[in-house]
């Protein structure tokens, strides 16, 4: 039996945020549905949230810190969902197929999340030192755990570095979705999952000669 994916212990558990903070993050999410982050001002965020500019700076260092917090919320929701989705699925390759579909689907259905993660934050070095990036690593650890279990259970080749396999899977997902995200085109999770799995699994699946 393939071991169930373990839920990573999160170091980010916090008390429920204050109502004003919730209003601010919701306001930014709403604005990001309409325009690029660079075109949004803190005054605009405050107006949509129904708060003062000063309250934004009470909870966030600056506008980019607010963006990181919005992304962090999306990441935690997705990590929790994929952990639940993987429960009861036997086999590393089956789990990877489900994870690939879920990853593509969240990009297809939540374009604000996709644009923040793939376009808005990665060009800034501070992102890689942030709490938000810690959530990204929690998710990537789930992928690595599945790969390692697949190697242990002789489903996945043991002559390829697990971290390289993880990079290949996550990088492939981003590449097939990126143009759709940038140009706001349709992304089909079913079609892209089948294409990616056919390509990736052919290279990593173990085929012992008997």
Image: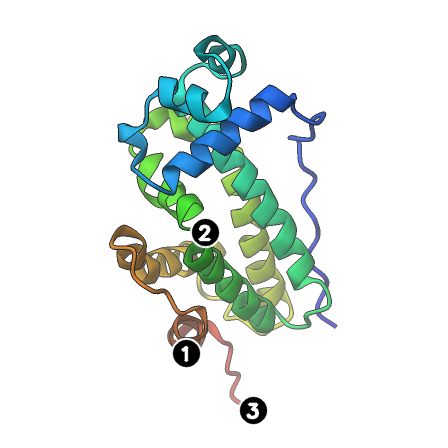
Residue at the spot of label 3:
210
Camera-side residue of 27 and 36: 27
Q: Is 73 positioned to the left or the right of 45 in the image?
A: right
Callout 1 environment at 10 Å: few (<14), some (14 to 19), or many (20+)? few
Residue at position x 44%, y 31% in the image: 28
Whether residue 123 is situated above or below residue 192 in the rendered picture: above
If you read the primary sequence from the N terminus, does the residue marked by circle 3 or circle 1 appear first?
Answer: 1
Residue 112, how many percent across, how many down? 41, 44
Residue at the spot of label 1:
198
- Please identify the quadrant where the N terminus is shown: bottom right
If you read the primary sequence from the N terminus, does the residue marked by circle 1 or circle 2 appear first?
Answer: 2
- Please identify the quadrant where the C terminus is shown: bottom right
Q: Is 55 positioned to the left or the right of 7 in the image?
A: left
Residue at position x 65%, y 61% in the image: 85
Q: Distance between the residues labelled 1 and 2?
A: 25 Å
Residue at the spot of label 2:
110
Residue extending furthest toward the bottom? 210
Callout 2 environment at 10 Å: few (<14), some (14 to 19), or many (20+)? few
Residue 29, how many percent across, how many down? 45, 36
Select label 1 or label 2 by which is in front.
Answer: 2
Q: Distance between the residues labelled 3 and 2?
A: 46 Å
Callout 3 environment at 10 Å: few (<14), some (14 to 19), or many (20+)? few
Camera-side residue of 194 and 74: 74
């Amino acid at each position: 039996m393939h071991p169930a994916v373990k839920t990573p212990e999160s170091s980010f558990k916090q008390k429920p945020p204050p109502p004003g903070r919730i209003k601010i993050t919701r306001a930014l999410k709403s604005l990001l549905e309409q325009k690029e982050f660079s075109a949004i001002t803190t005054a605009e965020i405050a107006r949509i949230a129904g708060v003062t500019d000063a309250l934004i700076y009470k909870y966030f260092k600056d506008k980019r810190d607010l963006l990181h917090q919005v992304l962090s919320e999306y990441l935690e929701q997705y990590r929790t969902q994929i952990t639940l989705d993987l429960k009861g699925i036997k086999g590393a390759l089956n789990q990877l197929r489900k994870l690939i579909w879920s990853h593509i689907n969240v990009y297809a259905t939540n374009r604000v999340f996709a644009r923040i993660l793939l376009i808005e934050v990665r060009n800034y070095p501070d992102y890689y030192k942030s709490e938000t990036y810690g959530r990204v690593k929690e998710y990537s650890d789930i992928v690595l755990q599945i790969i390692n279990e697949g190697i242990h259970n002789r489903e996945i080749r043991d002559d390829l570095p697990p971290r390289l396999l993880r990079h290949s899977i996550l990088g492939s997902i981003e590449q097939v979705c990126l143009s759709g995200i940038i140009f706001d085109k349709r992304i089909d999770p079913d079609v892209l999952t089948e294409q990616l799995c056919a390509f990736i699994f052919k290279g990593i699946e173990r085929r012992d000669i008997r």
